[in-house]
């Protein structure tokens, strides 16, 4: 069987998987789509984009 690739959040600084029905992991990341962010504020404890 082929390995399934995790659908990653489209916020470049976020390391979370996207919601099953969307492109982002949270509303916070979806709101950053038009700006360049250096830090991720999604609030997920496992996100490596949180500094």
Image (tube, rainbow, N blue to C red):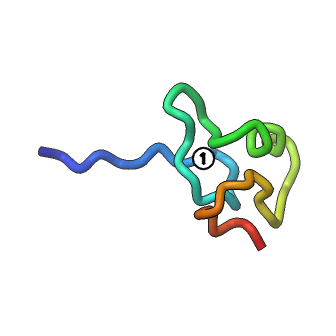
Location of residue 26 in the rendering, given as x and y in whole percent from the top left corner: 69, 40
In front here: 45 or 17? 45
Q: Is residue 4 left or right of residue 6?
A: left
Q: Is residue 39 left or right of residue 3?
A: right
Q: Residue reaching furthest front?
A: 45
Q: As drawn, is 19 to the left or to the right of 5?
A: right
Quarter location, residue 49: bottom right
Residue 33 point in image, percent of width and height = 79, 41
In percent of the image, x 75 and y 45: which residue is there?
A: 29
Q: Quadrant of residue 19?
A: top right
Name the image quarter holding the C terminus. bottom right
Farthest bottom residue?
51
Give x and y (percent) for residue 28.
79, 43
Residue drawn where x is 41% and y is 48% of the image = 6
Q: Quadrant of the N terminus?
A: top left
Which one is nearer the viewer's eye here, 36 or 46? 46
Question: Does 41 sit above or below residue 39?
Answer: above
In-image side of 42 versus 34 (left or right): left
| Mark 1 closeness class: few <14, some 14–19, many ≥20 residues within 10 Å | many
**Which residue, as the protein is rendered here, is positioned at the far top?**
21
Badge 1 element: loop
Q: Is residue 19 above or below residue 4?
A: above
Q: Residue furthest right?
A: 35
What residue lies at 64% left-to-right and 39% top-to-bottom? Answer: 24
The residue that label 1 is drawn on is: 9
- The residue under the point 80% across, 64% down is 39
């Amino acid at each position: 069987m082929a390995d399934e690739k995790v659908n990653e959040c489209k916020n470049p600084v976020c390391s979370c998987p996207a919601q099953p029905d969307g492109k982002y992991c949270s509303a916070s990341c979806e709101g950053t789509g038009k700006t360049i962010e250096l830090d991720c504020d999604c609030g997920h404890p496992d996100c490596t984009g949180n500094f």
